[in-house]
Image (cartoon, rainbow, N blue to C red):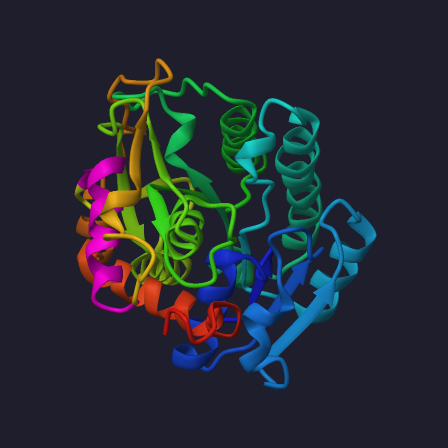
Amino acid sequence: MRLFTTGGCGFIGSNFILEWISEKKRSLVNIDCLNYAGQLANLKDIEDNPLYTFIHGNINNRSLVANALALHTPDCVIHFAAESNTTNTTQKPEHFLINNVIGTFNLLEEVLAYWQKLPNDSKETFKLIHLSTDEVYEPNHSTYDPRTPYAASKACADHFVNTYHHAFGLPTINIHSGNIYGPRQYNEKLIPTLLQQALSGQQLEVYGNGKNMRDWLYVGDAVAAISLIAEHGTPGEDYHIDGGKEQSNLSLIKTMCTILEKKIAHPDIPSFESLIRLIQDGASATHHYSSHNEKVQSELGWHPDTPLNKGLDATINWYLQHWATELGEKHL
C-alpha cells in the first residue's frame, strides 16, 4: 500500500508517519504547507529515508496535488491537514472555512479525478480517509450540532467526504476521535500548555468548576486505529475512536502534577498541585462529546491499550527531553 498524506508534519500525522515507516516499511508521500503547527523537526528522524517523500505545499494548490497524485500513484490518501488552532475560532473563522472546508473540497476534487482514471481493480481497493473530531456532535449526544466555527468547518468537511462517496462512488471514510494527546503536540494545546506553566511556576488555571469532561486518547493508540482503518476499513463508513474513559479537566491536571512531582525539582513552590486555581467564568457545566468504539472494535479488533497515567508519563518524558535546554539545570 502506497500512502499519500496531507498535513503529516503536524501532531497526529507525524506520529502516524513515523510508525508507518518504522513498522510497515512501505512508501509514503506527505504534503504539508508547514503552518504554525506543522514542523519539519517532527519527522527529522526519517527525512533521508528512501521510503519517505516530502512535498512542501498547500492542498488548495490543486495542480500541485494533481501532479503529486499522478507521480506517486497512491493506494490510499489520509487527510490529516486542518486548521485546529481553536484559540482563533471566533477571531478568525475564515481560516477554518478556507483550510478545513475549501481545502477538503479541493482535495476531494483532485482525488476523485485521480481515482476515476485508475484501473478497476485499483479503484476497488483505494481509500480516502478524513480525520475529523467528536466536536462536530452536540455535547452529551451523537447527532451533528457543532458549536464553534472549528467544529462547523469539520462537520462541513465530513459531509463533503460522505457526499463524494454517495454521489460519485469515491471510497471515503471519516474518522472521529476523542481528545488525542501525546508527543509532538503543538504547544498551544492543553497538556503542553499546562506543562510549560507548571515548569515555570505559573498558576494552572482550571475554568469553571474543573468538572468539564473529555475523553483522552493516546496518540499511539490513535495511530494504530488509523492504520487498521487505512488497511481494512470499509468505504462509506464513519469510525469513532476514543480512549474509552472520560476524565475531568481537574483530574487530568492533578494526574500530571503527580507525575511531575517524581521527575522535576520545584524549589520555589510547595508542590505542582499547589499551582492549581479554579477560575469561575460561568463555564461550570459538565460537557463531553459522545464517541463510541464499538464499530472499530468489532470490525477491526482495535481497542485503546494505553492507560491515561502511562500515556501522560510518556508524553511528559518526551517534552522534558525536548525542552531540556530551555529548562536548564534548575529543574533537571
As drawn, the residue found furthest toward the front would be 268
As drawn, the residue found furthest toward the right would be 63
Q: Is residue 293 magenta?
A: no
Residue 53 position (above or below residue 102): below
Q: Quadrant of the C terminus?
A: bottom left
Q: Is residue 249 magenta?
A: yes
Residue 163 position (above or below residue 72): above
As drawn, the residue found furthest toward the top would be 282
Q: Position of residue 294 (x, y in %)?
A: 19, 42
Answer left or right for 216 relative to 4. left
| Boundaries of the magenta span | 246-264
Camera-side residue of 117 and 191: 191
**Is residue 23 in sight in this rendering?**
yes
Camera-side residue of 99 and 25: 99
Answer left or right for 115 relative to 144. right
Residue 45 position (above or below residue 189): below
Q: Position of residue 221 (x, y in %)?
A: 29, 59
Residue 327 position (above or below residue 156): below
